[in-house]
């Protein structure tokens, strides 16, 4: 049974699970609802899970942009490109919006993009 309820303080829907269910992932609750053919509950949980993921995604993208802005603003676009190139495991993430970050670095430092 879903415990998605509107929180007036947060002004959004949140999970308000009983104490003995705290720590169970929204994903596992959604899977259980699907298996038990509780479609409306499953749809609500999936929508909530999407919101959870987007919240984390937006936080991480903001952090990444701030980090790249700092590197580009302090050392310029060349250092920014080098730091991205030297981080191959994170390259797909670091390259998201890198064009706008490079433009800000060039504007901040007065150093043209390479």
Image: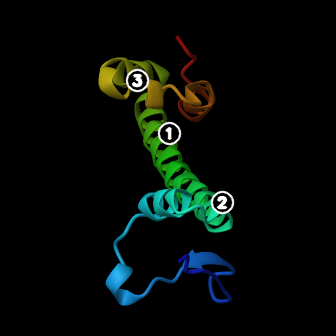
Distance from Cα at disc 3 to Cα at disc 1: 16 Å
Identify which residue is drawn at 40% across, 30% down: 75
Distance from Cα at disc 2 to Cα at disc 3: 34 Å
User: Residue beneath label 1, please?
Assistant: 69
Q: Nearer the viewer, mark 3 or mark 1?
A: 3
Q: Is residue 113 visible?
A: yes
Q: Position of residue 23 (x, y in %)?
A: 34, 72
Q: Counting residues from the N terminus, which is met first, the one under dot 1 or under dot 2?
A: 2
Identify which residue is drawn at 42% across, 88% down: 18
Q: Nearer the viewer, mark 1 or mark 2?
A: 2
Q: Are marks 2 and 3 in contact (CB under 8 Å)?
A: no
User: Residue beneath label 3, please?
Assistant: 91
Q: Nearer the viewer, residue 12 or 79?
A: 12
Relative to 82, is 110 above or below? below
Mark 3 neighbour density, 10 Å: few (under 14) some (14–19) many (20 or more) = few
Q: Counting residues from the N terminus, which is met first, the one under dot 3 or under dot 1?
A: 1
Badge number at residue 43 = 2
Q: Are marks 1 and 2 in contact (CB under 8 Å)?
A: no
Under tag 2, what secondary structure?
helix
Quarter location, residue 41: bottom right
Q: Nearer the viewer, residue 63 or 50?
A: 50
Q: Nearer the viewer, residue 96 or 22?
A: 22
Q: Position of residue 17 (x, y in %)?
A: 46, 83
Q: Nearer the viewer, residue 42 or 90?
A: 42
Q: Is residue 90 left or right of residue 47?
A: left
Identify which residue is drawn at 50% across, 25% down: 95
Quarter location, residue 37: bottom right
């Amino acid at each position: 049974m879903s415990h998605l309820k509107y929180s007036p303080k947060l002004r959004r829907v949140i999970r308000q699970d009983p104490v003995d269910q705290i720590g169970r992932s929204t994903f596992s609750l959604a899977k259980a609802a699907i298996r038990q053919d509780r479609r409306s509950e499953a749809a609500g949980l999936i929508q909530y899970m999407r919101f959870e993921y987007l919240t984390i995604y937006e936080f991480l993208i903001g952090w990444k942009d701030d980090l790249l802005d700092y590197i580009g603003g302090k050392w310029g676009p060349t250092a920014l490109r080098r730091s991205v190139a030297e981080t191959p495991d994170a390259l797909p993430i670091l390259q998201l919006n890198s064009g706008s970050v490079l433009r800000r670095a060039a504007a901040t430092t007065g150093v043209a993009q390479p």
